[in-house]
Amino acid sequence: MSNFRFKALEIAQSRQALAVAAPTERVGDFFGSNTFNSEVMRTLLSPEAYLKVTEAISTNGQIDRTIADEVAGAMKSWATSKGATHYTHWFQPLTGETAEKHDAFFDITMEGKAVEKFKGSALVQQEPDASSFPNGGLRNTFEARGYTGWDPSSPAFLMDNGAGGKTLCIPSVFISYTGEALDYKTPLLKALNALDKAATAVCQYFDRNITKVTPTLGPEQEYFVVDRALFYARPDLVLAGRTVFGHSPARGQQLEDHYFGSIPPRINAFMVDFEFESMKLGMPVRTRHNEVAPGQFEVAPTFEEVNLAVDHNALLMDLMEKVSEKHNLKVLFHEKPFAGVNGSGKHNNWSMGTNTGVNLLAPSTKPKESLRFLTFLVNVVKAVHDNADLLRATIASAGNEHRLGANEAPPAIVSVFLGESLTQALNDLETKSEVTVNKGDNVYYKLGLNRIPSLMRDNTDRNRTSPFAFTGNKFEFRAVGSAANSASTMTVLNAIVADQLNAFKSDLDARLAKGEKKELAIVDILKEYYANTKRILFEGNGYSDEWVEEAARRGLSNIKSSPEALGVFVQPESLALFERTGVMNHAEVESRYEIELEKYIKNVQIESRVMGDLAMNHVVSTALKYQNKLAETARNLVDLGMNAEAGPIKDILREISTRVIAIKRSVESMVDARKKANNVTDTTERAKLYSTEVKDHFDIIRYEVDKLEEVVDDEDWPLVKYRELLFVK
Ligand code: ADP
Ligand code: MG
């Protein structure tokens, strides 16, 4: 058969699950075996160097050159003993991918002899030829210098390149010649630092032993898997990461039988394989299951310190792509690869832990701890309330735009779910009815929070439609896109909470200065915060139309378009907040805004081009051929005197013509819209045109093409159909 689609289907259907050797050792024996972790350091470094490095890690301090030389030497001998030939600084430029530039461990001496070499200076700093990484105007291309610098808080690891040997990867920041951040990690580290300071200061009111607060993140990663042959038979999946056409299959996710169903053997083999590799890289992947849509799955790690979790998530995605190839599968991280079924997110589970082992968002039965819990809870709610649009900006992308507000996904409205008992407790606090605080030496307060302990169990799973949900002992930000780097969201979340905690501290200090009793003052402030921010709390179905109306009545924003959402980054209040918290200066924020807009434009442009190409060169041409066949049949019938029988065929001929004309017109007008947009130099304006005038054509073209799919003979249809992409495995 000449049809590419059927060839691909034949290949896909004949594939069997790969035999994967499951680990024979116990997890403890191989977990982290490919990382230069603290155990390895303890054995390979002098006690002095080991101490310096661990100290630098916990205090974000500097590591001096002699220590760096020793660490580099140890890293090199460890890596080469495990088969590494190259090393690289591994960083996260604003393209959204991870970047690496491999250098060999050997050098040539003056005498022409090859010797192994890796100095402390090479460990600490590298200068990649970075002129083609996006910088949003921060670095002129003729001044291409950008530096990568070692981040000791994220362990170096060995990346297996298959036949290409192994490379030692050193997690790094990426900054410009003039010191501005060109990556995701640098501002994230600053935000985490700001949160640590602010939260520790607030903890001091409750417990003097708390000297460090570490934000934690557990990112659940959703993804689709399709057969490799089918993937390559869909140019839109290859180029745009999503299908721009495809009629809904007779069976989609309406049976809801996929969720937590049994995992297909080929996918299971893939999971076992990448999980084993992840464990060796020190990534604690723990949960695997099917997701709601057919062909959709999830992987979740145990939570870690945010910076590490972000690195690990980026590494995990990279690893999953590599391992999927081995299984003749393709993993899709796009937020909405298929219309009409569930999209994919990256649920960011977030909390804060103290050096004393306390989770600051875990409710407690003890009144004093309850007040601390409430302090952090209410401050987080207020931070989200006051900065909802900024949070929304961090999840804006061309891909996520297809998902937010669509099937089975949180809307673009940021709301917070707390659960019934907790909301009740806060209402009690506000109305004061159950709060009893006695002055005097014997401070006794009831707070009306006797319900808190029992809320734990019933709360966790209640509401899956809230974009920002309290799930018992952490918040879960579900609106983050599956393809996103969590750093952007984590930078803003930690920065706004840090900023809010600083504001809380000044409010409290002002009252204490007036001689108010601490506990009373805290309760008063929390009551006021709660009253002013509770409109963001929503317990109902976040996916319903009623909520959209209700949210509008409450004055909550619902920013649907990405360019508009991104615009919030550069509003004066946002710039001031980033400056105040020391996370980014104005130039850095503005360059990021510019880069995100460019990314958005490019992605919509690619989608639009793929759409035009597929519509004209695949769909319309096929439809015309089919129409010709039908015309011949009709003519034959007329020749035989069967005019009445030729009637319905003529109807089909007319339908095809009408749709073909509609497609052709729309594609032409979309191309015109693109040309018009491309001539606009202002990026904001151009992005706006892409999000409206170019993108407005997508639905129209898609509608007509999907209708043609229903009409044209299945034998002739060139594009792999949804039922085949989603159900063949
Ligand atoms: P669900 O699908 O029900 O939301 P999962 O078990 O798939 O739950 O994922 C929950 C995620 O939340 C895991 O990654 C888990 O490690 C993470 N998590 C649990 N406690 C915390 C915490 N204190 N801070 C950050 N993340 C956490
Ligand atoms: Mg989960």
Image (cartoon, grey):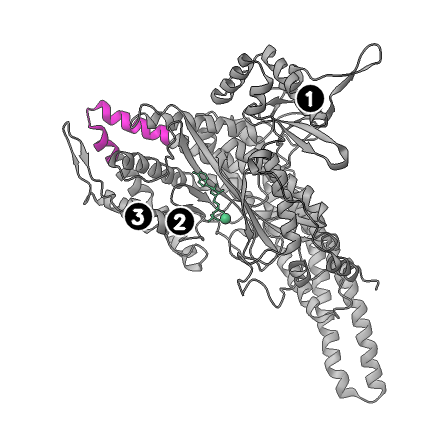
Q: Is residue 686 visible?
A: no
Q: Are marks 2 and 3 in contact (CB under 8 Å)?
A: no
Picture residue at 76% right of the left edge, 62% below the top: 718
Q: Are marks 1 and 2 in contact (CB under 8 Å)?
A: no
Q: Earlier in the sequence, mark 2 or mark 3?
A: 3
Residue 474: image quadrant is top left
Which label number is shown at residue 454? 3
Question: Real-space Cα distance between discs 1 and 3?
Answer: 60 Å
User: Disc 1 or disc 3, which is closer to the eye?
Assistant: 3
Picture residue at 22% right of the left edge, 43% below the top: 448
Question: Real-space Cα distance between discs 1 and 2?
Answer: 52 Å
Quadrant of the image for the N terminus? bottom right
In the image, residue 515 lies in the stretch drawn in magenta = yes
- In the rendered image, residue 677, in percent from the top left (x then y), is placed at 66, 45
- In the rendered image, residue 190, in percent from the top left (x then y), is placed at 49, 26
Which residue carries the number 1 mark?
Answer: 143
Q: Which residues are magenta?
A: 501-524
Residue lying furthest bottom: 641
Dot 2: within a 10 Å radius of its alpha carbon, few (fewer than 14), some, or many (20 or more) residues? some
Is 557 in front, or is 487? 487
Which residue carries the number 2 mark?
Answer: 460
